[in-house]
Image (tube, rainbow, N blue to C red):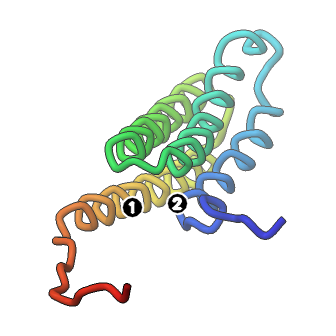
Amino acid sequence: MNYKGYKDLECYIKARELRIFIAALVKKFPPQEKFLLTPQIVDCSRSATRNIAEGYGRYTFTDTRNFFIIARGSITETMEQLTTAFDENYISQNELNDGEAKCELVFKLINGYIAYLDKSKKQPVQQTNQIPNS
């Protein structure tokens, strides 16, 4: 299968890298976070890639844009969960900085894709005065 679609989007590629980073990072969390912080941070990082994929597959401007906005929100939630992990001394300052840098990049890339969608929607459809061949 040669279909790639959303997998070619830079925002998806970087969000996937973030998701993998988070999956490795949570392995350091203590057992008492098994049902609290760990599933929350994993889920919000996964939510970003899920919503990019689903939004891309919607094929309507409004739906696509909305799913990318939700993905962007999942990135900011991931940033907050990283801050919580740092505040609880589960991750180092360097890990927090790395995670935040990854989140910020994905956030900017998603914003760029939303701007692209907005610009594309505003483009007028070219009308031709040619009569189609009969």
Q: Quadrant of the C terminus?
A: bottom left
SS for dot 1? helix
In the foreground, 73 or 7: 7
Report the front residue among 48 and 33. Answer: 48
Q: Is disc 2 placed on a helix, strand or loop?
A: helix
Circle 2 crowding by C-alpha within 10 Å: few under 14, some 14–19, many from 20: many
Which quadrant of the view contains residue 90? Answer: top right
Q: Is residue 24 left or right of residue 89?
A: right
Q: Which residue is mark 1?
A: 113
Which quadrant of the view contains residue 125?
Answer: bottom left
Q: Amino acid at mark 1?
A: Tyr
Q: Is residue 31 above or below residue 118?
A: above
The answer to whether the residue labelled 2 contacts the one labelled 1, judged by CB atoms less than 8 Å apart, is: yes
Specify the quadrant of the image occupied by residue 25. top right
Where does residue 132 sit, x and y in percent of width and height?
31, 85
Residue 46 shown left or right of residue 65 in the figure: right
The residue type indicated by label 2 comes to: Cys
Q: Which residue is mark 2?
A: 11
Residue 4 lies left or right of residue 127; in this view the side is right
Residue at image coords 32%, 66%: 116
Task: Residue at 65%, 27% (x, y): give it.
Answer: 43
Q: Earlier in the sequence, mark 2 or mark 1?
A: 2
Above or below, comparing residue 44 to residue 15 in the picture? above
Q: Nearer the viewer, residue 20 or 133?
A: 133
Residue 113 in the image: x percent, y percent?
A: 39, 61
Residue at x 62%, y 21% (from the top left corner): 40
Which residue is found at the position 56% from the left and 48% from the top?
57
